[in-house]
Image (cartoon, rainbow, N blue to C red):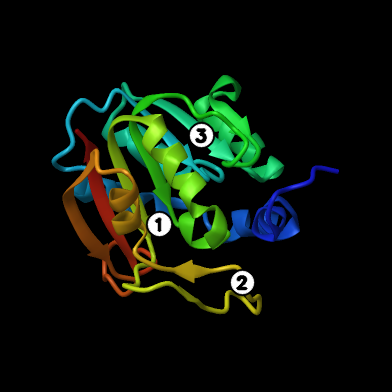
Amino acid sequence: MTRYTTEQEAFWAGSFGTEYIQRNQGDHLLAANLAFFAKALAVAQGLGSCVEFGANIGMNLRALRLLHPDMALHGIEINADAAAELAQVVGADNVQQGSILELEPPHCDLALIKGVLIHQNPDMLPQVYDKLVEATRRWLLVAEYYNPSPVAIPYRAHTDRLFKRDFAGEIMERHPSMTLVDYGFAYRRDPKFPQDDITWFLMEKR
């Protein structure tokens, strides 16, 4: 049995992570993701490749492929069941199954993380930030729950499994080479393309 550094990683690698797959797929989500990435990446140029941290079954990468058909897609996913489905989207050679903390991501034009930093152990965030910045040649898109100060909130009857904070601000403070280019908010009550109340930040490495 695989041993993980944090309780949060073991949580997502196990049955809860597998159950998550069924709640987060379908044509409506794909359409919402298309609208989301069209807006969040509107000013980004030269997007020839992307690596997504915590890619699950590839719903984000499927949307990116429709927007950028020639983009080379890579995904990192801790849950083995999700990684197997992700391989059908981007190819088995482009999937790394395991912990973000342990794997070495490929270098791509765009590094993406969406709804994943909120589930990381706060003590490990500096290491994850370093991985994200290392992975990108130019662009970094972070889309998470925002709060100006760190806070933990209950998540589906579980404690210490969801955290909100200023992830992008912390990344830029730790890595001055990352500069904010654009940002915005996606609302769960959007009548056409709802997302999960996430705030997104597009940064450029300079």
Residue 68, image x, y percentages: 28, 30
Q: Residue shown at 70%/60% (left/top)?
A: 7
The local secondary structure at tag 1 comes to helix
Classify mark 3: residues with Cα within 10 Å, few (<14), some (14-19) or many (20+): many
Q: Residue shown at 53%/24% (left/top)?
A: 94
Residue 99, image x, y percentages: 63, 41
**For mark 1, what is the residue?**
28
- Count of numbered circles in the view: 3
- The amino acid beneath tag 1 is His
Residue furthest to the right: 1
Q: CA distance from mark 2 to mark 1?
A: 30 Å
Residue 97, image x, y percentages: 64, 35
Q: In front here: 161 or 166? A: 166
Q: Is the residue 17 above or below the residue 198 in the image?
A: above
Mark identifier at residue 75: 3
The local secondary structure at tag 3 comes to strand
Specify whether residue 35 is in view. no
Q: Residue shown at 68%/55% (left/top)?
A: 6
Specify whether residue 54 is in view. yes
Say left or right for 206 vs 159.
left
The local secondary structure at tag 2 comes to loop
- The amino acid beneath tag 2 is Asp
- The amino acid beneath tag 3 is Gly
Q: Is the residue 21 above or below the residue 198 in the image?
A: above
Judge depth for marks 3 and 1 and give the one in front: 3
Disc with the residue nearer the chain's start (2 vs 1)? 1
Residue 1, image x, y percentages: 86, 43
**For mark 2, what is the residue?**
160
